Amino acid sequence: MDNLLTGRENLILMADLHHLGRDAGRERAAELLAQFDLAEAGAKPAGSYSGGMRRRLDLAMTLVGDPRIIFLDEPTTGLDPRSRRTMWQIIRELIADGVTIFLTTQYLEEADRLADRIALLDGGRLVAEGTPEQLERLVPGGHVTLHLTGADELDAAARVLGDASRDEEALTLQVPSDGSVHALRSLLDRLDLASIGVENLSVHTPDLDDVFLALTERTETRKESLR
């Protein structure tokens, strides 16, 4: 991106590099300015843009040639929450249109919200790969919180389930679980066979921050043991 050129001129320059032709290039530039909410700023020098606007212009320039694969290196670093969410929405729309995106980020919440598959790197080494749900099941700490309908049901469920933490006042049991469909079905079947009423339940699994910290801690432990 040339900071001295306007946003529109940057896009037209990219269109020229892609040999789109004069009319097609200007039409594509106008289309992308509108898509990325930059139409009003299109006549202003790119150097005057805010951080979020610069990121949107960078991505718009990448899309001039209608690529089907895009590499994004930490696209939301330094952005405020509103600009970050705007960028997330743009990325989701590109994915919905069939674009494949390789995204590097240090924000694991961002990876969790956007990625179909995630690879966790530690010191340049791959330590885990999978869907967000698969990765979150790699470390302990997951549980199901059962809200029982009464004190008698709480006592009965505690007897049936055994390894569970109970809260007498809230009428809840916290049962260790990986949160999988199979585990939930098995848990509910056991309660159903004992005719124990459950008002509702919630599933809690470790987030990707927990997973990363646990896996990199194991890596450090292995390194220490080899010294």
Image (cartoon, helix red, strand yellow):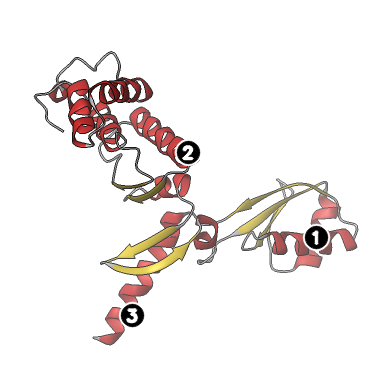
Q: Are marks 1 and 3 in contact (CB under 8 Å)?
A: no
Image quadrant in which the C terminus is located? bottom left
Residue beneath the point at 24% across and 16% down: 41
Q: Is residue 15 left or right of residue 151?
A: left
Q: Nearer the viewer, mark 2 or mark 1?
A: 2
> Where is mark 1, residue-wise?
157
Regarding mark 2 in the picture, which secondary structure is present there?
loop
- In-front residue for pair 156/107: 107
Point out the tag, 1 or 3, that comes first from the N-terminus.
1
Q: Residues within 10 Å of mark 2 (few under 14, many from 20)?
A: few
Marker count (numbered): 3
Point out the tag, 3 or 2, that comes first from the N-terminus.
2
Q: Residues within 10 Å of mark 1 (few under 14, many from 20)?
A: many
Residue 162 percent across, percent down from the top left = 74, 69
Residue 75 percent across, percent down from the top left = 29, 41
Give the CA distance from mark 1 to mark 3.
Answer: 40 Å
**In the rendering, which numbered label is found on residue 222?**
3
At label 2, which amino acid type do we have? Asp
Q: Residue farthest to the bottom?
A: 226
- In-front residue for pair 206/101: 101
Q: Is residue 55 left or right of residue 128?
A: left
Q: Quadrant of residue 81?
A: top left
Regarding mark 3 in the picture, which secondary structure is present there?
helix
Residue 216 percent across, percent down from the top left = 35, 67
**In the rendering, which numbered label is found on residue 97?**
2
* 44 w.r.t. 214: above or below: above
Give the CA distance from mark 3 to mark 2.
Answer: 43 Å
- In-front residue for pair 166/1: 1
